[in-house]
Image (cartoon, rainbow, N blue to C red):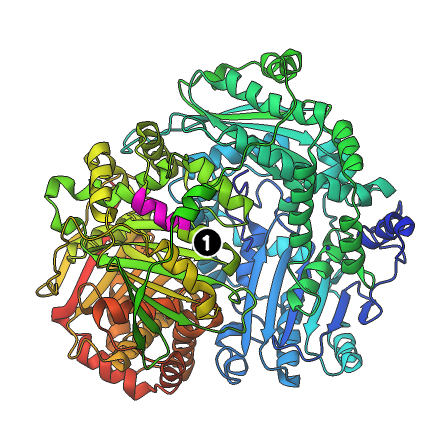
Amino acid sequence: MKDIKKRRRYKRGHKVLIPLILYFFIFAVYNSTAQSVLPVPLDPDMRYGQLANGLTYYIKALPGSKEGVSMRLVHKVGSNDEREDEGDFAHAIEHLAFQSTKSFPLGIENDERFNSSGFGNYKVNASSGRRNTTYKFNIGEPSPEGLKLGFLWFKEIIQNLTLTKEDIESTRGEVREEYLGKVGTQLAYSIASSKMYSRIFPCEESEEGLLDHYDYFSPEKIRKFYEAWYHPKLMALIIVGNIHDPVDVEKQVRSTFSIKPSKGLSVRPQNCDSLYFEKAPQFVIVERKIDSNKLIQDKSAEGHLIFRLPEFQPRLESIDRATKTFYLKMMLDILNERLREGSEKYEMKRPLIYDLYTQDLPSAMEIVFSFKNGAGKETVKKIAKVYHQLQKYGILESEFIKAKEKLLFKLDWLKEDQPEYWLQEIDSHFIRGEVLPAQKKLNILKYVDDLKMKNLNNFIKEHLVKSPEDIGFIAPAGHEALSFKEGEVRFWFVDALDENIKPYKNTEVKTLLSNEEVKSLEAVKFIDKGIEDFGAEKIILTNGVEVVILPTSSNDPVSQHRINLHGFRIGGAKFLTEDDYWSALNASQIVSNSGVNGLTNFEVNRILRHQNILAGAVAPYIDNAEHGIYGSAKPENLETILQLVYLFFTRPNMNKLAFENWKSEKIDWYLKSSADLYAADFNEARRRDLGDKNLQNSHNRRHLPAGTLGILSLEETDYEKSFNIFRRFFGDAEGFTFLITGDFEIDEILPLVLKYLGNLPGPNLHKMPTENKNSTFPEGSTFQELSNKGNLNMPNISYGTSFIIKPEDFYDWKERMKIEVLGEVVRQKMWDLRFKKGYGLYDVSARGQMNYNLRRYEIHTYLFCQPKDFERLQEEIRQIYSDIIMGEISEEELSGAREMVEYFNFSEKAIRLGTKINGLYHHYRFNYPWTDIGRMSSFTKELNREDIVEVAKKYLEGENFHEYVIKGN
């Protein structure tokens, strides 16, 4: 299912003993009068208790943890506990906890004690959902002062939020903008979806009227909600990490939090699970409103089949509950795979399956599917056939093995020396009643590893015998789904039993190349050009392909043993006629969707899945001025990746049905995606007005325009032209440069490189153009109101500013780092508009960067604001620039800016996502100097206020300044 609550922030002995062990180890058993956990022993290394006022605490020491200390205050109240006129109050109070309190009159993040330890040492955050609200205080370098400060903030949350009128008014705008930011252009769908779910699940709320509620709810009502629900009995304090003296910390907890509540607890959380399972089966149809002004309309309907699983409630006294949980996960995974396989055709949409328990809903399985007008009956019956086939014939051994491997991988993803593992487990213990004894994870892994296929098949036969209890449809006016009758839909599902359902057969996993084809490709000779100063080895193959290989090492377990590849050559859409422009840019996606070597895209992806390689691991592209191909894999999968690279050059498919499917998928994504289309449309319009027609490059991939411009491009894209352009650009490889980085030895990968890259076609039959250095600098300061090309219903205004700057020296990497830090300083100050000045903003963005293609510096900002705030925010942004030029940069802002630049460029995650291979690319593509990452990191850390003010005075000039706005039609 899509996020039902889009406005919510969401940010695991002896064989005969294992079932009994798991019964006690996984789920708490509740007595008949209270929710207190029976004495199933907790991990003996954990300190646990309950104060006289009802507050529960957990302390788990992880000696030597490099992640400091993580503290949580978990409140067992969320949106499930809101009444009709209290919509989003639990979420609003979560925001208000960052506003004024008795001990933090300016808010925790503006308190001198919070900031005096140095930026980044203390970090606070919070989230709210259906069952609970969680407040987070993390300490990077453990200290007594950090513990005391975190304890004080949590204590304030429990009983000392001031909830002033000014704070509530500010928060009113924040939560409103967060909701709009998350639903994006899907407001009508989100409202319809919430109406459907509110009629199925007793504790769900309809979002109809929510925007008005945000504007007009009474401050007194939210104060009463806080007074009623914020009581120690409903709360738990969790402390996990590098704790030197747990006994002393426990004493501090008892002395700090032994507070007397101002009054007793007068409310009780609803048992939403029981209310749901006691409710009669539901059949719900909701009409989705259509914005008739929108560029294109979503005319499809969405169906929901929900199968209740009351036996999987976490609080039932059943030994079966423990042992069946893992069977359920495997069954859902196998059913999901079969539904995927059944829809692997260019004219079909894939149904999705969800375990609703993982979304804090009552335990149930949901299948969600979309269908065109007239296809409802056929779609339901296709799903029912897959469902009944699994129930009738069971699973195959290959499916069982794969599902078990996936489950074991998920269960073992977080390690017991990681704070996040314990935070999740303790949270489940307190909120859901799942118990947490010693060696829980070890016993679970042993049990899952010992699961038998026969038992899983018996489980499937037992649990797939029924039809869905709850059925829902969301459809636009005029769609057949609005007239469906409950009896006929339920009959469609049952009627599939009477049809001839044959046993499931494994879909054949083909090979990219046959054994004979692989043998026919011989490793070619090469010219060794030596080793660069920075350690990269450069070779030239006989077909004119240049290969640069840079082995790297990493301490990041995700980065270790991974290889990144990027091949590129000058020549792109700008060198073609204007009529061919979009056919060229879209060509790579069209070919990727068509497949290679006679294999469909679905067959190629099946080969990749079989080897645990993500779809899209190899991605060709044609940009404005260059074309190329990306690849990423583990060393054991490198040959598969190189085979796919070879086939894109030599044997791309031409498939008209795949082309039509590609267009349909693009439109479907545009209509149904919750991505921020407002920002996408704004950024594309701004970039093009500033003379930048290159594709955006992030996470080591090129991205076609995601918003309305991408949809408009479909009419300008010709199928045959796209294929012929792709063949022209990739039909030979002379002049290509391939960059390869990763955790490997050169001798290990060189034979495969010579075999596959060495046999790419050449010499160059279609000479590629020589690129002229293209620099674009718009003249003078400008203000432009851009067109709302998609006729999107915009409740807010998109507003942004840009500085376009000509570098004094394009090759000066130190100046580039200063520009990046300057951009982050701007972003730090923009957040103050929300957190210090009270503007109703959910998200803001600012970035300083080098645009290598256009050889210029850029500083961009963007925000999505209420119309009433626009003119004031326009002045606020201008004032931010003036303040920076005048040197008004706090140490907190500068430290935060440096830390963010460090994270985006030099962290293990940044390196994993392509810092090193991008550095190689900039060096070989733009002749930009190669600079050691450690050297750049050290330089960035030492930048001071004077350095940033200097570049601000140099570049933040009026003639470089441009403003843009998009308003609703």
Q: Which residue lies at the image location 46% right of the left edge and 50% below the top edge?
A: 640
Determine the secondary structure under disc 1: helix
- In percent of the image, x 71 and y 79: which residue is there? 63
Badge 1: residue crowd in 10 Å (few <14, some 14–19, many ≥20): some
Residue 706 coordinates in the image, percent (x, y):
32, 46
Q: Position of residue 380 (x, y in %)?
A: 55, 21
Tell which of 417 and 86 is nearer to you: 417
Q: Please say whether residue 385 is visible from this viewpoint.
A: yes
- Residue 648 located within the stretch drawn in magenta: yes
Q: Amino acid at mark 1?
A: Glu
Given residues 726 and 577, the one toward you in this image is 726
Which quarter of the image is occupied by the C terminus? top left
Quarter of the image for residue 816 reads bottom left
Magenta span dominant secondary structure: helix
Q: Is residue 443 above or below residue 660?
A: below
Left/right of residue 344 with respect to residue 224 in the rendered view = left
Residue 554 % position (x, y): 51, 73
Res 231 seen here: no
Residue 348 part of the magenta segment: no
Q: Quadrant of residue 439?
A: bottom right
Residue identifier under label 1: 639
Location of the N terminus (image quadrant): top right
Image coordinates for residue 771, horizontal then vertical, percent: 13, 61
Image point (11%, 70%), residue name: 959
Which residues are drawn in magenta?
Answer: 643-650
Residue 723 lies left or right of residue 829; in this view the side is left
- Residue 535, compared with residue 657, is above or below; it is below
Question: Toward the viewer: 350 or 966?
Answer: 350
Q: Who is closer to the viewer here, 459 or 61?
A: 459
